[in-house]
């Protein structure tokens, strides 16, 4: 039976997008003191996509339901909506909600506990620079036209900036296969490859977030490694623009995060 005081996050997209949707619902449910639910849409199978947060739902007693609550629909992706906080009753949230501002009233340890099962407050950072390189599906023409692909020059420039601040830290390049990053590994002295293919996505995000410094791709997956890793000014670099399409992506850039032209 569905609890009447419930905020339901309707899932969309891959792991990073699912995390944005769930985190927005979590933030609102915490504010209202409501339960949190997940709606996979349609027949509850999530279509041809993979729902990767099942263990998170189980661990946090988040019910997976077909919601018939009224829908609060995001108007435009990458745009923050103040009206989100005017919600006072049970609702189904539909959209990407990709703005750091939805998360500002939620403590970082509580978000870490939601997604990783524990706070990382006492976990010491590794003295290294982690790079997340997303190629794979981004190389497919229908995706590359919209998203674009982060260039090796971007990653090299970002590493140079971080090393100028923190010294000659070793670099670990995370990607699905070595072929996609062979040239990058050759271009960055002191770099090593970490294969992520076959690993659970949340385990990869946690590994990427464990370093002293981070260079992200234009991917929500990367973004979450940065946010959950608690990175601040001077130890994280993101690409600009985020996607090729002409949109304002300022809601993704947490104040203080450095941007490097891609």
Image: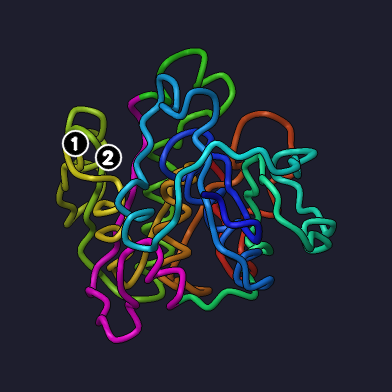
Q: Is residue 108 left or right of residue 103?
A: left
Callout 2 secondary element:
helix
Query: Magenta part of the protein: which range?
Result: 109-136
Percent x, y of residue 184: 27, 40
Question: What residue did someone put label 1 on?
Answer: 197
Q: Quadrant of residue 60?
A: bottom left
Percent x, y of residue 158: 43, 55
Q: Is residue 137 magenta?
A: no
Question: What residue did someone put label 2 on?
Answer: 184
Percent x, y of residue 46: 44, 28
Residue count near mark 1 (Cα–Cα under 10 Å), binned few <14, some 14–19, many ≥20: few
Q: Please name the colour scheme applied to the rendered image.
A: rainbow
* Nearest the eye: 247 or 234: 247
Q: Is residue 222 above or below residue 168?
A: above
Q: Is residue 115 magenta?
A: yes
| Badge number at residue 132 | none
User: Could you tell which of marks 2 and 1 lies nearer the N-terminus?
Assistant: 2
Q: Is residue 217 left or right of residue 252?
A: left
Q: Quadrant of residue 179?
A: top left
Q: Is residue 245 left or right of residue 141?
A: right
Percent x, y of residue 78: 70, 45
* Nearest the eye: 187 or 81: 81
Instruction: Report the residue at 67% width, 46% height from top.
Output: 93
Q: Quadrant of residue 85?
A: bottom right
How far apart in space, not on screen, are marks 2 and 1 (Cα)? 18 Å
Which of the two discs, 2 and 1, sits closer to the camera? 1
Instruction: Report the residue at 27% width, 77% height from top.
Output: 125
Instruction: Report the residue at 59% width, 46% height from top.
Output: 240
Residue count near mark 2 (Cα–Cα under 10 Å), binned few <14, some 14–19, many ≥20: many
Residue lying at the far front in this picture: please name it: 1
């Amino acid at each position: 039976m569905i609890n009447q005081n419930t905020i339901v996050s309707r899932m969309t997209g891959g792991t990073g997008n699912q995390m944005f949707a769930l985190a927005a619902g979590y933030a609102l449910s915490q504010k209202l003191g409501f339960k949190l639910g997940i709606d996979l849409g349609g027949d509850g199978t999530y279509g041809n996509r993979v729902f990767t947060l099942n263990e998170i739902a189980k661990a946090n007693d988040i019910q997976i339901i077909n919601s018939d609550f009224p829908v609060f629909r995001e108007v435009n992706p990458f745009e923050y909506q103040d009206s989100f906080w005017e919600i006072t009753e049970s609702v189904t949230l539909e959209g990407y909600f990709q703005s750091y501002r939805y998360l500002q009233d939620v403590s970082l340890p509580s978000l870490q506990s939601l997604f990783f099962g524990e706070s990382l407050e006492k976990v010491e950072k590794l003295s290294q620079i982690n790079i997340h390189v997303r190629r794979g599906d981004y190389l497919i023409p229908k995706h590359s036209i919209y998203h674009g692909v982060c260039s090796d020059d971007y990653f090299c420039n970002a590493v140079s900036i971080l090393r100028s601040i923190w010294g000659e830290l070793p670099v670990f390049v995370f990607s699905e296969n070595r072929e996609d990053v062979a040239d990058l590994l050759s271009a960055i002295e002191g770099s090593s490859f970490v294969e992520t293919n076959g690993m659970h996505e949340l385990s990869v995000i946690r590994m990427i977030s464990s370093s002293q410094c981070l260079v992200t791709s234009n991917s929500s997956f990367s973004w979450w490694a940065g946010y959950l890793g608690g990175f601040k000014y001077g130890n994280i670099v993101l690409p600009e623009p985020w996607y090729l399409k002409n949109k304002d992506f300022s809601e993704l850039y947490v104040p203080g995060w450095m941007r490097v032209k891609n």
